[in-house]
Amino acid sequence: MPYFPLFIELKGRQVVVIGGGKVASRKVEKLLPFEPKIRVVAPKVSSYIENLEREGRIELIRRKVRLKDLSDAFMVIVAVDSLRLQERVYKYCLRKGIHCNAVDSPDFCTFLFPALVLRGSLVVGVSTSGKVPALARAVREYLETCLPDNLESLIGELETLRKSLPKGEERAERLMQVIKEKMNTILQRLQKSI
């Protein structure tokens, strides 16, 4: 069964990442642009995570996780290999109503971490509902090559237009007309460069 995509505000919300290795580092890196408060709990961490702590961008607790470390969390990411710990954290999160993602273990997740394309305000999440994350990553990589670099300026232009028009069907139709015109121009440029 496919998962429903949901885009939520993370700014200022507590996200706890359990683990400090390569996978945890990638998750932290993907979360940073969304400006949550990130707490990493792990006895050993990568130099990337150490640098983020030094810069004051994350909180770091250097020890094994305790369930009380999660009590104020909005979201938890379990980036460790221990299935026993993944299950324990997942069950705790379920009881407390905390969103939980156990990396590479969809059975211990209340949400999946998508492969992300981020271009300013444009966010595209790609998922195979946990079945083949490598395919989601490949699709993300393909999308990144297809999208133009100036999307943020296009979003700003379209946002200004949207605000200038009254709500309703006419606004939606006008926006779609302009978007189609802009996208056709972008696609023509892409085809010429190939």
Image (cartoon, rainbow, N blue to C red):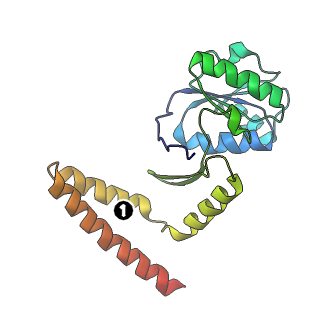
Q: Is residue 71 above or below residue 6?
A: above
Q: Position of residue 149 (x, y in %)?
A: 49, 66
Direction top: furthest residue: 68
Residue 144 position within the rendered picture, expressed as x and y whole percent measured from the top left: 57, 64
Q: Nearer the viewer, residue 39 or 168?
A: 168
Which residue was labeled with disc 1? 154
Q: Is residue 143 above or below residue 9?
A: below
At a point 55% along the width and 32% down the height, the residue shown is 36
From the viewer's side, name the closer residue of 40 and 110: 110
Disc 1: CA contacts within 10 A as few (<14), some (14-19) or many (>=20): some
50 sits left or right of 75 in the view: right
x then y, percent, for residue 179: 31, 66
- Name the side, left or right, on which 50 lies relative to 73: right
Position of 127 compared to 166: left or right? right
- Front residue of 15 and 106: 106
Q: Residue at x 55, y 65 (%)?
A: 143
**Which secondary structure, mark 1?**
helix
- The quadrant in which the N terminus is found is top right
The vertical placement of 178 against 41, above or below, is below
Which residue shows up at 66% across the image and 44% down it? 29
Q: Residue furthest front?
A: 1
The image quadrant where one finds the C terminus is: bottom right
| Residue type at tag 1 | Leu
Instruction: Specify the quadrant of the image occupied by residue 92.
Output: top right
* Residue 49 in the image, given as x and y percentages of width and height: 74, 37
Q: Does residue 163 sit above or below 95 in this rendering?
A: below
Total numbered badges shown on the rendered structure: 1
Q: Residue at x 48, y 83 (%)?
A: 191
